[in-house]
Image (cartoon, grey):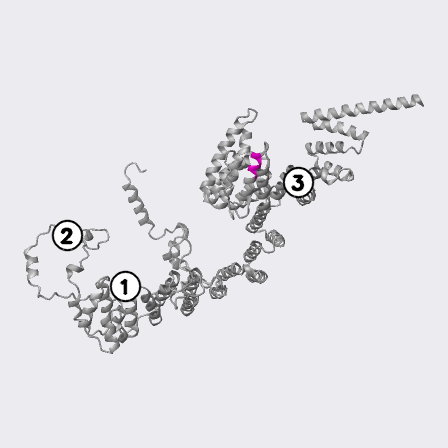
Amino acid sequence: MAAGAGSGSGAGAAGAASVASLWSEVNRCGQNGDFGRALKSVNKILQISKDDVTALRCKIVCLIQNGSFKEALSVIHTHTKVLTSDLIAFEKAYCEYRLNRIENALKTIQGASQQTDKLKELYGQVLYRLECYDDCLAVYRDLIRNSQDDYEEERKTNLSAVVAAQSTWEKEDLGLQEGTYELCYNAACAFIGQGRLTDAMKSLLKAEDLCRQSLSEDSDVTEEDIEAELAIIHGQMAYIFQLQGYTEEALQLYNQIIKLKPTDVGLLAVIANNIITINKDQNVFDSKKKVKLTNAEGVEHKLSKKQLQAIEFNKALLAMYTNQADQCHKLSSSLQSQSPEHLLPVLIQAAQLCREKQHTKAIELLQDFADQHPEKEAEIKLTMAQLKVAQGNVTKACIILRTIEELRHKPGMVSALVTMYSHEEDIDSAIEVLAQSIEWYQEFQATNVIFQPKSPIHLSLIREAANFKLKHGRKKEAISDLEELWKQNPDDVHTLAQLISAYSLVDPEKAKVYPSWFGCGRCNQEASLGHSFQWASVLQQCFQHFHLWSTTSIMTCLLKIPNMPVKIHLSKYLPSSDTMSLKVDVDALENSHGATYIRKKGGKPTNESLQKEQGQGDVKKKRKKKKGKLPKNYDPKVTPDPERWLPMRERSYYRGRKKGKKKDQIGKGTQGATTAATSELDASKTASSPPTSPRPGTITAVPSSTSNMIPPRHQKPVGAAATKKKQQQKKKKGGKGGW
């Protein structure tokens, strides 16, 4: 027993020594980064003591360092009694994060009793992946403020990335110096979101220079490694070119990045999607190849929800452009189920239905979506109106547009409705639209400062209404609009001219007393007393008040009034020619390109021209008008053909040419008989043609001329000799050579 006891204590001492040596081996391998050998040593320790907490944690760390996240997580779940959540919260959350179980990682972090710095770092990464940018920004600000270690630069980089990725794209002044290429890149992304493309390009160029400088210092980094690192920067440059409209430069950069074959599947997916958007409905075969890059494994974990949604939208549009109707309907329906409030999937389905000539179903689909989402009603109705216009139902499109209350009285909508009604020649409806818009602006004068009457928008509508009515002959209706415009701007002579012209055509009597609108006290006094105007006396006083206006324009307006009693006497109240001269160089005007007549210079007057100038009283002789020529076969007794101006084929009595057989011609060519010989050869035309077979008992008489007849094959066609002579003459003209 004593011996046995002694041997047992010796074995225990040997086991303790072996465990200590194993721990020293684990420590040495961990410092050297050889986590594979460290894992073997830890497993030997766990064989001796399977519930050793330190050994279990070391095993989990070794598995994480080797990338075996599933095995590490299974070890944590297997030893839940020993490994409590407080001890192993960070390792568990990190494994879940790397396995893209973001929701589980968030729960694990939030369930930890103590929030350490490394757990906060992971918490910020989880919030960034969940696109909770506001909470993530607060976490990184707290870390930067309350931590002092060597990772401050990385935290600032993450902070700038959060700012760049915010959905509002509102860059705050965080006081971060763009000292690294990562910070410059993130700042450029924020500038792109704000629309400051020039500043974004400057930041990207700076990021490219900093990246080359930092990587070139390492001798182990090759040029290919540098280009691979710069790929994401060049991708953003290409995106800026695309936004600026330089599609060729953007495509060139995109294709260069694809040729490098970067390992980042997210970058390849974004570039392929952007190329598809550039191609649109052109080069669809190239777009089909690029779609495969967006379906790579792991893309969904590299991109944000908005990026993935945009890629799916483009897939549906590409299916529509390639006439894959079923695929387009499938993708758009899936997108609509994922985002029921989003409008774009419904628009894609409606566009596909229109391509299939199912306009009624498309309109029904849009109407159903508008009923379910009233906040999208304006956009839906605009699309429905566009479909109606495409079908040719302009009037129905106008009816739909007039039901959009929030856009009904906007200047753009009013202009579109007036144009469409004018196209349909529905002038009354167009005037009604203008009148309703003007009235709407007048009603909202007290409730809204922006839409108060006499605002520029209101006056422009009145001006357009007046011009539209005058254009279509509605002068009487235009008078009220012109009066309103004149009251607002009495110095507008053009409006005054239009108003006087309208009154002169509608109510000449009112046009005669219209000078009261000039604002002259004398005119208003005469009008209030009911006196008839004495134009010669009143106008002279009125002109004293018009020193700021153009007297010529006013007189032009007044002279347009018909039946004006003193038109003849108004000329003496006009200013002299010296005061009315516009100081125009007549010679320069005549020699300009727009002159239709140029006066000849240097010509001396002759005696005849002087005599003509002296005899100014001679009446010029009028030239007699020449009578029109009549056709040669003209018969005054016969009424001319009313369709004589039409071409013969378009006349009602034209029946076309008769295509009869030419019986007189036997054949064509040199071996055929001529027209003169055919009558002689036709036996049916001879009166004494013998029967085909002689009758019995009769003797047929043979004509004496048959012996002199020439067979048809030996006959020469008429004019053959003449043609031969002509040919010989032509050959003689060619000269001695004959070629």
Left or right for 671, reference 126 = left
Q: Main secondary structure of the magenta part?
A: helix
Q: Residue at x 70, y 25 (%)?
A: 29
Q: Residues at badges 3 and 2 in contact (C-beta under 8 Å)?
A: no
Q: Quadrant of residue 513?
A: bottom left
The segment highlighted magenta reads 152-158
- Quarter-wise, where is residue 218 in the image? top right
Q: Pinpoint residue 329: horizontal percent, then vertical percent.
A: 60, 54
In the structure shown, which secondary structural element does the residue marked by tag 2 occupy? loop
Pick the residue in front: 408 or 693: 408
Q: Is residue 212 above or below residue 718?
A: above
Tell me the amino acid under the disc marked 1. Answer: Val
Q: Residue at position x 23%, y 62% from top?
A: 550
Q: Earlier in the sequence, mark 3 or mark 2?
A: 3
* Camera sees residue 633: yes
Name of the residue lying farthest toward the front: 146
* Marking on residue 493: 1
Q: Amino acid at mark 3?
A: Gln
Given residues 410 and 561, the one toward you in this image is: 410
